[in-house]
Image: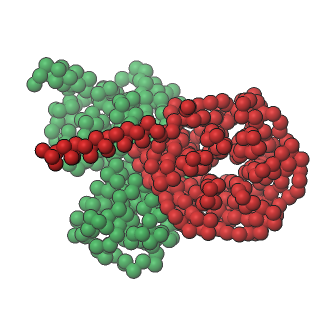
Amino acid sequence: MTFPNLLSWSLALLLTGGTLAANPAAESETAFCHQDGERLKPGNAPLKLVVGVNDIYCKDSSCKCIEHIATRQYGEFCRKLKEAYNIDLQFIYFLEPYDLDRAFRAEQFDAVLSKPWLVFRHPEACQRMVRVADLQDLHRNTGLWGIVIVPKDSPLKNLGEIAGHRIAYGQSDAYEKHQGALALFKREGITIPADKLVEKASCLECIDLLMKGSVDAAVISNYALTADCAVDITTPDAFRVLGKTEEMPLTSFMIDLRRVSRADACRVQQALCELSKTELPPSMSGGGFVKPASWKVPGIER
Amino acid sequence: MKKLLFLAAIMACLIQSTATHAANAPEYVSGLSYGKSDHLPTISSLAVGKDDFLVVAAMNKVFIYDPAKEQSVRSFDSGFAKISAVAVEGQTIYVFSRKTKPKEMALNGRKFTYEVPIGAQCKKFAWDGTLIGELKLENLMDVINAKVVAGKVYVSDFGGTRTIRVFDARTGKAMASIGKNLRLCCGILDFAVDPKNEDVLVANLGAFRLERYSPAGNLHSFFGKRGDDAESFQGCCNPVSAAVLPDGNLVVVQKDPSQVKLYTPQGQLLFQFKDLQELVKGCNRVSLAVDSRGRVYLGVDMGERFILQYVPKL
């Protein structure tokens, strides 16, 4: 190990309480959890975190088309968090996930509140980011998955029948409708020739192609027909769902352990979940934060 | 060896051609800002009229700007509570407004009011602001943008047919309906008319494409996709507006994140406006106009409302 490497490792170990590489069992787990024998003592000193936010149900980071659905506002919640727990969350809102991604890669944040794949698709981020809490939507759901849809009058009746047909699906920055879709097809023994797979960056483009008959099926995010611009274009009744991809967390509060100690990460986790349980303001539109579900990023090791 | 030299020559030609193209690519720089001292209310539409004077619709009023001056030279009340679009041909100013009625709706236990379009109105004014008369547009349900080119009125019928409808500017008789399978959202449907051939360019924002239709309504070509690269469009749905420059190139506008880019008619990116300030926040329209000298005008609707000019760099 070269001296600069040794220095950066030493610094990382010092900043993270010496645990980054200490627990091989948690190597691909993204959820923050206590490690064997670990005793964290969260303090009460003022803690200020700069947080990059892209939450599909938040009024400040969503499209006007769904303003009646995306009603969540964090102002009151953050005020209570500061008063009761001395934790000051400075939210910076992003309507465009690409912009949040750029800012995240430029290391502008102590924490990120977004779809976890935005963070964990970067291998280097897997070394330092942990999910301390998941956020519930309006229906207390914390999951995100892809759905395989066909037009209501399509001759395709079940998932297996899509083999060999033209499929529009997401790009690799959208796990639930790209990697998740490919994994689903593989699991079900469905073969789609490469020239019949059409990659699109947005659910809207996939739905557009499906409605025009340019493809026979599309893989879109599970919320796309109810909480996305697609609500202006079509309705869920116009389609049948033939299958769903594996479930992953929809929105997580993720902390950078290179900038925040494990003790403080633990403190933020406790505060987010406790406040959500006891004094959640109605402006949070839903159930607030809960402890993170286990989610291991396939193919990426810490 | 000969083959190598031949390949090298081809490569050199390619490099030379790329460099030449880059050198010829248009560049724009920011110019004047109009309307700051007029304390403009919400800007709904821009048009260019006589002598390249800028015509701005803001709430109930129409403001006229000399392109050389940042303050309006005159303004007049349209008689509408809210103007939705303004267009100019010759010395006639066409002012449009939507007729709506409130409809109560409920979702997830929340009640909200939605304004449902039930018709469209059009008044014609002389260049000095004198009312000339009204124009009844046949069976039109809505109007959120409008242009008048070569004796034809083009309007965005967002709440009705969700197409661009074309009318005779003299009689108001319906002539054509343009735009197929448009994926419209955010209450936005904007377009441009190419004065050279009367093609209609529609910002199909839900499909992340700019589409070119013939005057008869046939889809000729399109370009665009969602993506993180410079050529592509970002945000929840974009682009939102377009205009045709005198040389035939296109100005294409993205709302949030705000971007203005120049493309060839075939969709090749030529230039992106640098240091552009945020034009609007979230899902809002961006008003756009270009004049005979290729100057670009953009409505800014942030804390302050004004019109931003970009001029070709000489």
x, y (%) of residue B194? Answer: 61, 55
Residue B85 in view in this figure: yes
A65 is higher (above) or lower (below) than B305: below
Front one among A62 and A36: A62
Q: Is residue A98 left or right of residue B80?
A: left
| Picture coordinates of residue A148, whole percent (x, y) | 37, 66
Chain coloured green in this rendering: A
Q: Nearer the viewer, residue B102 or B309?
A: B309
Name the residue rendered at 63%, 35% in the picture.
B309
Q: In red, which chain?
A: B
- Determine the residue positioned at 58% across, 57% down: B201
Task: Locate residue B107, reporting x and y percent.
Answer: 60, 58
Report x, y in % for residue B60: 80, 45
Q: Is residue B80 above or below residue B198?
A: above
Q: Quick check: B308 left or right of A143? A: right
Residue A85 visible in rendering: no
Closer-to-camera residue (A150/B102):
A150
**Residue in the image at 47% along x and 29% along y:** A90
Which image quarter holds the C terminus of chain B?
A: top right
- Residue sitting at x 27%, y 61%: A182
Quadrant of res B38 = top right
Q: Left or right? Give the position of B279 relative to B27.
A: right
Residue B19: quarter of image: top left
Image quadrant where one finds the N terminus of chain B: top left
